[in-house]
Amino acid sequence: MAIVPADHNSPPKAPAAATAPRQRLIQPEAYGSEEQAETSLRPRRLEQYLGQEELKQNLAIAIEAARRRSDALDHMLFYGPPGLGKTTISMLIAEEMGTQIRITSAPALERPRDIAGLLVALQAGDILFIDEIHRLNKVAEEILYPAMEDFMLDITIGKGQAARIKRLPLKRFTLIGATTKAGSISSPLRTRFGHVHRLRFYTDEEMQNILIQSAVVLKANLKPDGALAIARRSRGTPRVGNRLLKWTRDFAEVRNAKAIDAEIATQALDLRRIDQAGLDPADRQILETIINHYQGGPVGLETLAAAISEDSATIEDMYEPFLMQKGFLQRTPRGRMATPLAWSHLGLEPPMHQLPLFEVGGL
């Protein structure tokens, strides 16, 4: 199978932001040339993919059924936080189907001819993978409607009153969309996907197995207890876990450690100030600011952003989801609040008004 990235005349434009987000060791988004570096760590077959068992079972049935019919797979939408393997699974689907996959992202499809050129070039059974599909512009989205439903491409010829629409037939293909914001996808587009799957965070045990598998590729002598120590700080995200593994491998080499055990892994990650819950200094700064400056909250998002000199959108998109998932942060109508669990994690005693009623002699 050949992996053919889409070729476009204009590069994707990054969304404007008030400040550039910090580059963090535990951020789930890829940075720099990391996407290319991840390729060697990706599994080659679907059965080698660890975790997401329910999703794998559903995909195995869909793939086998399509093979028996000698037909293309139905269109698929994968959604969930970044770094969980949406691109990897799409590449594995193409491998299992024995077909090509063309990879692009929605910001790269600015003009009608960008997406039209991709659709026309697809062969029967090919997969078109569009990352960040929630960022498709309206024109590109409307071109996809007949392409997904009827495998037809509508081309407008001429202008004004003389304009007419010509329909070109397309080969039967599979569109796979990936997004971190499923709610931002328009209803007409979302309903055209036959399969919609949510990728979940990985358990510590699943992350441990993923890291052991990655260590073989990286030729790192990783012990099971070392893998578990890294897994617990990986935020349930393979991309983060592999990044931490690479750092721990470098640490072990410099310290002349023969193997990466729990002690070496702990020393390496403590040096980068990543704690047992997977929080880094930026995460702790948010919690400490809410607790120390605002008595645990509530505090408004804009006020919090100003207090830590960070963009509010960055806080909302990059920091809050994990803090809320771990139970350290609450969103309320009045603002953000640090939970009693956050106080305890930072070694502080929560005030009486922060404690649940049963802990203060209530109901």
Image (spheres, grey):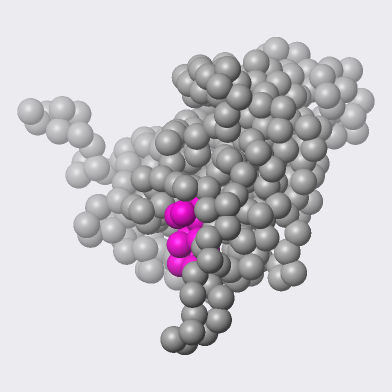
Where does residue 28 sit, x and y in percent of width and height?
60, 44
> Of 341 and 204, which appears nearest the observer?
204
Camera sees residue 213: yes
Seen in the picture, residue 149 relative to 67 is either above or below; the reply is below
| Horizontal relation, residue 243 to residue 323: left or right | right
Outermost residue to the top: 224
The quadrant holding residue 71 is top right
Total numbered labels: 0
Where does residue 300 sit, x and y in percent of width and height?
32, 64
Where does residue 128 sit, x and y in percent of width and height?
62, 45
Camera sees residue 233: no
The quadrant holding residue 302 is bottom left
| Horizontal relation, residue 148 to residue 27: left or right | left
The residue under the point 75% across, 59% down is 7
The magenta region covers 133-147
The residue under the point 23% across, 37% down is 355
Which quadrant: the N terminus? Answer: top right
Where does residue 191 sit, x and y in percent of width and height?
36, 45
Dominant secondary structure, magenta? helix
Seen in the picture, residue 153 relative to 70 is either above or below; the reply is below
The residue under the point 53% across, 66% down is 166
Which quadrant: the C terminus? Answer: top left
> Of 342 and 168, which appears nearest the observer?
168
> Of 310 and 18, which appears nearest the observer?
18
The residue under the point 67% across, 32% down is 94
Seen in the picture, residue 221 relative to 88 is either above or below; the reply is above
Does residue 144 show up magenta in the picture? yes
> Of 33 and 324, which appears nearest the observer?
33
Outermost residue to the bottom: 160
| Horizontal relation, residue 3 to residue 184: left or right | right
